[in-house]
Image: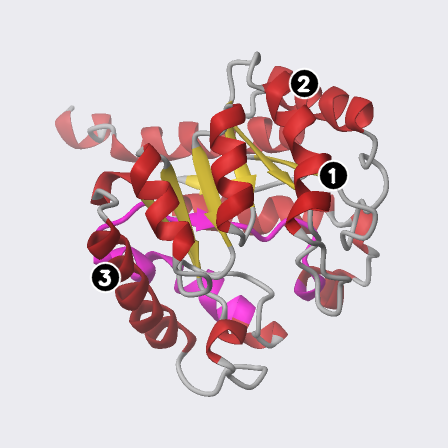
Amino acid sequence: MGIVNVTPDSFSDGGLFLAAEAAVAQGELLASQGAVLLDIGGESTRKNATPVDAEEELQRVIPVIEWLRRTRAVISIDTMKPDVAEAAIQAGAGVVNDIRGLQGDSGIAATIARHRAGAIVMHNPAVLGSAEPLSGDPIAICLAYFEKSIGIARAAGIPDDRIVLDPGFGFGKSPQQNLELLARFSELGQLGFPLLAGTSRKSFIGRITGRDASDRLVGTLATSVVAALAGAAIVRVHDVAEHMEALQVTAAIRAAASLPDARANA
């Protein structure tokens, strides 16, 4: 999943793609590099970001969606607002990426269900007013949150095969908790849903490497490979070309490990 932030204040690329022409060019580039999904967002989700009303968010994302739907990539709208989700789907989006995990505005689950869109359900303790960082086992906390979100999705009529779970790296978690989530990522698969890992350029990587947000590619690649080996179905990234190569090698290694041992059969 390639990230297209049509915002002035996203944490690593804010302002670079605020103009629709720049956002479209970036989306086309990511699609050409192999992105299967393009996640388009018109409101920064970083801590202390300036809130954006629905009208402004729509002005940012709809022209971009209308153009990028011509690519082969599936379009995802990164939004918390039902009105924005509705308009984005009408414009060509097939997935709604909700950082409130369907536990914010109740209308967003109904919108997804009505259009039979896909839903990315992210764990976000801020929705519940939880203190930061989390207190307790981050895996158990994410699983309990997901169970509630899945219940909301099912009650709204969203089929299970249209749901993806995202533990929300960087949202209400300490650097150590982010690392623990990554180290135990496979445990999140016990609910039986596909998993998304969104670690790209996150601050916990910078704390380890000392790199600024724009210079965390190598660290991000390490986290994405670990997540893929642990069962991630999707990695959400800024740098698609480099991830395609890294994940191709990762897939080849996994395939080799599954082959019969020729020496044992000799």
Any mark on residue 28, and which? 2
Please give the residue where the numbered disc 1 appears in the rendered image: 6
Q: For the residue carrying disc 3, how many other residues have a C-alpha within 10 Å: few (<14), some (14-19), or many (20+)?
A: few
Q: Secondary structure at mark 2?
A: helix
Q: Which image quadrant is residue 213 in?
A: bottom right
Location of the C terminus (image quadrant): top left
Residue 254's place in the image compared with 169, above or below, is above
The mark closer to the camera, 3 or 2, is 3
The type of residue carrying mark 2 is Glu
Q: Front-most of 158 and 251?
A: 158
Any mark on residue 151, and which? 3
Q: Secondary structure at mark 1?
A: loop
Query: Percent position (x, y) of residue 147?
Result: 26, 65
Residue 192's place in the image compared with 41, above or below, is below
The mark closer to the camera, 2 or 1, is 1
The type of residue carrying mark 1 is Val
Query: Percent position (x, y) of residue 31?
Result: 60, 20
Q: Is residue 145 magenta?
A: no
Q: Front-most of 32 and 47?
A: 47
**Horizontal placement of 141 versus 180: left or right?**
left
Residue 80's place in the image compared with 113, above or below, is below
Mark before the other along the chain sequence, 3 or 2: 2
Q: Which image quadrant is residue 143 in?
A: bottom left
Separation of marks 1 and 3 at Cα, in angstroms? 32 Å
- For this orientation, the residue located farthest to the left is 265
**What residue span does the magenta drawing correspond to?**
178-204
The type of residue carrying mark 3 is Gly
